[in-house]
Amino acid sequence: MTKPDVTKNGGPAADGLSRRNLLRQAAATGAGIGAFSMGGAGNIQFIPAALAQNEPPMGTWPAGSQGPTVSIGATVPLTGTYAASGSDESKGMQLAVDHINEGHPLIKKIAPKVTKGLLGKQVKLLVADSAAKPNEAVQAQQTFINQNKIILMTGSTSSAVAVALNHFAEREKVLYVTAITGSNDTTGKDCVRYSFRQNFYGQTAAAAIGPVLLKQFGKNRKSAFMTPDYTYGHTVTKSVNDYLTQHGGWTMVTNQVSPLGTQDFSQYLTNIANSGAEFLLNVNWGRDAVLSIQQAKQFGIIPKMTLIVPYQTPFLAKEAGPELTAGVYAATDFWWTLEDKYPLAKMFVEAFDKKYGYKPEWGANNSYMQFAAWARMVSEAGSFYPPDIIKQYEKGETFPSTVGDVHFRPEDHQAVHPVIIVRGKKPSDMKNKEDYWEVLEVLPGAPLMQTPDAFGCKLGAYT
Amino acid sequence: MLRQRPFLVEALTAAGLIAVPFVLPYLGFTPATVNRILVWGLFGIGFDILFGFTGLLSFGQSAFFGTGGMVAAYLLTVLDYPDVFSAVFVGMIAAAVVGYLVGLIALRRTGIYFAMITVAIAEVFYFVEFNPLAAYTGGENGLPGVPTPTLHLGFTTLKFNTDKSLYIVLAVCYFVGMVVALRIVRSPVGAVLRAIRDNPLRAAAVGHNIHSYKLTSFVIAAAYAGFAGGLLGIMQGFMPPDAFTFDTSGQLVIQTAIGGTGALFGPLVGATVWLYLSDFLQTTLHLGATWKLVLGVVFVLLVCFLRHGIIGGIYDIYRLATGGSAAKAKAGDGTPAPAMTAEEERSATHAALAEAPAAMPMAARRRTGDEFVGPILEATALTKRYGGLLANSDIDFSVKRGERRGIIGPNGAGKTTFFKILTCEIEPTSGRIVFDGRDITGMSVTDVCQLGLTKSYQVNQLFARLTVRENLTISALAELRGKFRLDMFRSVPKIRGLAEQVEHTLALVDLKDRADVPVAALAYGEKRRLEVGLALASSPSLLLLDEPLAGMSPQERVEMVKLLKSISRGRTMIIIDHDMDSLFELVERVTVLQEGRVLVEGTPDEIKGNAAVQEAYLGGVVAA
Amino acid sequence: MINWANFISQCFNGLVLGALLALISSGLTIIYGTLGVLNLAHGAMFMLGGYAGWVAYSYTGSFIVAVIAGSMFVLVVGVVTERVIIRSFYARTPEDQLLVTFGLGIVFVETVRFFFGSLSKMVPPPPGLVGITPLGFMFYPTYRLALLAIVAAALLALYVVLYRTRIGMIVRAGIEDAVMVGSLGIDVYKVFMLVFGIGAMAAGFAGIVNAPVVSIAPDVGEAILVQTFVVVVIGGVGSFPGAVLGGLIAGEIISITSMFDPGYSYVMLFVAMTLVLVLRPYGLLGTAGRE
């Protein structure tokens, strides 16, 4: 690099960068044409691909959608506290991808414009272990973006992961559908333009289970909370406690906050045992939930206190045993016996059971549904260009799901989706070995939700 | 080896960093992996200064990595501080301050204790990050949304928002980090750190305040860790709480050990191997979680068989290939001279003493002021008690300026304990020592050496991995720079008077043609002379010599006596030895110790004829 | 919940936890005191004991067999490790010793992960010890009560070995002065091998008897290792009584702090360690011997 060069072009770095930008421009123009003709071959007539045709490249677009397949990167916990749920979620994801690629009737009910594949391309799912740690998830997604040019990210199971990936998605300009995350922050103060959540969360769980508890147990009761120490735990505990204190005059006599992955809960449980509480509201999740409930039994807290699970964890009854969950009230996103009520749920449960040999819990259902919704948005928009897909979501159109009609709120990217209240069955009442919960109510989502700006959501820019 | 060609290493580093984006993609490295390697490499530069150069193995570097990263990320995300580069800088300063405070506690101990304390303190940071400070650090959430850097140049704005453009930022940071580190290790501070690594006891005894230097090294390592932590947050747009885990510290240690210590590039090499293999084993071989097992086995094998890591291994191969080092060239030199009879020896000694000394000794420098004219050393009623055992009892001892004093006594007479008390290595139970008119009782060995009183040891205390010249440099630096000075960016050769002082001492102890040989390759007699040279290089006004002739062949003894004679001019010396013939040749007066007390004192001739002394020694012989 | 009942209950929790920490730390400290090697794989030994016991349990269904198998397996692992690897490190620097035991710890953990996966495993308590025992001030899980007795018995056994047998005398002498033992004409290597084995076994035994309380996973040893460091630093490196005292202190600090806020319990533990270091640099019962 000679001196005059430097002064003319603003230094070697600037020179390099601007040249790279030029190259990108060129690639994008070529790609735009490619995508267009590909669209024609894929037999989708009214693609507004022209919309995106002249846009500069962003994130993995258009590189990620130029070949015959498009890839989705999933970072789910395959090890650690949330491993059981993570593997269940990845099964739901795989089922959705299979259905998209074969044009399964269930997916066509949700996303009618899906043929075999999406816009003429096969979809490929890549899975990495996040161990429920944000750092691992971000690193794995970064690798997927670099090596596989993924066009969609998913996987969280810990809201800490979801929040980190939210911001990462915004920066990398790659779409992200969150998978399980219960924190209010995910579509609240940490919401971003590039991310969408379809499952229930602290606020809706509280608003759904609160009235049921007040109706069942009356006013002015004493509660002890167990809270995992991160955004999910704190927001769920706050939402539930706020509801119970404001509407029912309940008092929180203790809140035991434990780190994610705690093994021995004896110190926490001792505090609860001596607190004089009547109700144990356990917000712990995954293995933490199972262990804390088992140990609560060892310490005689259950059945002395009534256990309530405000945000249900998949496989709780299976792992802790139905004796422990009998009579327990819980809020959840989906339970497989809803198949009696919703035809799409029946199709889903049957397809899942056939492939994996057990009834899906809500993590798998959520994973499936969010891919189906995404496939709908992409096929309706007729484009892989991220802002086009986002705008399609933001139209807020109602579409069918396994729990009836749902839609996304444009203001905070949260799905308006019913919350299910269930109660644990006694082992003697179970009709089959997976009949752990009885569905009490299916509460429509809209009345439960806060106003979109209540948790400080400010979506970012499209580009 | 880092020193010979100025700027060669810097130039090669720059060239390497420029070449990387063009070469590594072909080897299967993604830009994200390359960036990650640079962050770990930068983190490791500081760690290598701490471990490789100072010999302090910390398992708690995660505390500083996390602190730097969190402070920078907090500024950038929560406070919306606009400038990424200065935020990282603030994070680095914060980490350094924290490093200083932690160092004050952790450096109270050394070795394994130090390692355990660092682990434990890092755990405190982990728990504090997760709980009391969760409002600031995000706890388990970490701090997401860390922005990428932009550079406003007035006429244009550079945005570093892709992996490839971030590489430019990270590479520049790494380069700057490396240049600074090279300056530090080439500075007098760097030299003293290496001396501490090799022999902390002697580094203190030649007059360096080793605690302050260790703390310096610890703070430097913390600053590098904080710097790297800040870059981590920027690189991935998210500051993870995982930065604080024990895993982070462990990975750093492993990478450094794999790459090699003491060359600054080791951690980079280690990180390259570690991250590449982890990518390769996971994405290409699909080993899943097993990748860590494979790397663990590789690590254990490396520690067992390749002691100095990959860089050390390459260096060894290079040395083999180039036909051995200077050390090997003269390896056969240590053969002892043919035995002499006592008579021959005595006449040889006389002959040697008659010759003119090889070089004039340097003048001893008085540092306590010139006004005092009394005895240079005056000890009163010195007593040292170990439990029920009296090692020294009520010793009064006085030496005149310029005197050569000998101390003899049977084994167990308390001679070495007496010396240790005089040089303040141990504190007397009672009594008082006055050196050059100044009460030095209870002072540290370092301060006493700075005043001009030092000792050569009975058992060699050398800096084993340094060359002869470097050994003497360490000692001379203490005199020229004082016990502690933070001249981290000064080049050693540029210190005025250093080269001549070292050369002079080299000539004096007759090791001029062995100057660049590592200590490990010296013959015993040479080591012994170097031992004396180390004491001498700080130009003491009072030199204590603990059995300088011990273990030497007759020929070597002759040379040593000659040396001692020559250096005694203008200097006060006290010598312990068992070789009475040689000793009586050398000294003017002799003090005889027995059972921790002064038995008698007098000229050599008086002592020779003293019945009590003969009795004591006869007794000694019988007892032996 | 700051009230008397809770205070007493938490003290009791602390006793159980402290006894367990004391047992694991004694293993670490006698190895260090005798061999001069700080075994960073000690946490992995704890974990190995749990897994070996779990394997034995899944084949036999007997808790007793699981405990014996767990301890014996770790004893053998300890002896073999000393013989094959540690022995060649006595002449190397303390830093090299730390590196190799650290590496061994990783290898043990990842080997277990390779064979048994990352999901946690549960060993149920023996049938007679299931359930709850009323203690007056609180209900306490019966097995945890039994655990206290089991661990106390193990500590007593270790005491007998150290203070009432010839090998114990040699070990204690070695802690005082390793050179002297060597000059007594005792085959020090044989002693070292045995001590390493016994020290590891203490951790392994703790690992399996603790398995019914919490489930076992490949990484359970890591947190324990750091806690044992604290125990050993508080009690004094190389001191068996120090390890017991340090363990109990650590257990009580963790539990009593939990009463106010569990989030601070580990912070307080490390603060206590720092205090000890400042006030008594060699630990409560340690002496300025080994560094």
Image (cartoon, rainbow, N blue to C red):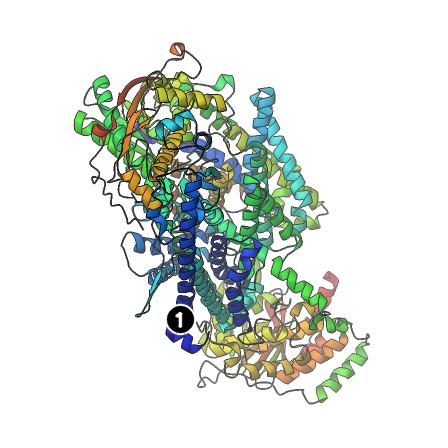
| Residue B517 occupies quadrant | bottom right
**Is A3 in front, or is B307?**
A3
Image position, residue B226 (x, y; %): 41, 58
Residue at the image point whose x is 71% and y is 65% from the top: B620
Amino acid type at image mark 1:
Gly
Using the image, determine if residue A26 lies above or below residue B326: above
Image position, residue B335 (x, y; %): 78, 72
**Is A9 in front, or is A213?**
A9
| Residue B530 occupies quadrant | bottom right
| Residue B313 occupies quadrant | bottom right
Where disc 1 sits, the SS reads helix
Q: Chain of mark 1?
A: A
Using the image, determine if residue A14 lies above or below residue B510: above
> Can residue B257 be seen in the rendering of this structure?
no
Image position, residue B604 (x, y; %): 67, 80
Question: For this view, does A12 lie left or right of residue B462?
Answer: left
The residue singled out by tag 1 in the image is A11
Category of crowding for the residue at label 1, using alpha-carbon neighbours closer than 10 angstroms: few (below 14), some (14–19), many (at least 20): some
**Is B519 in front, or is C169?**
B519
Image position, residue B8 (x, y; %): 55, 73
> Can residue B61 be seen in the rendering of this structure?
yes
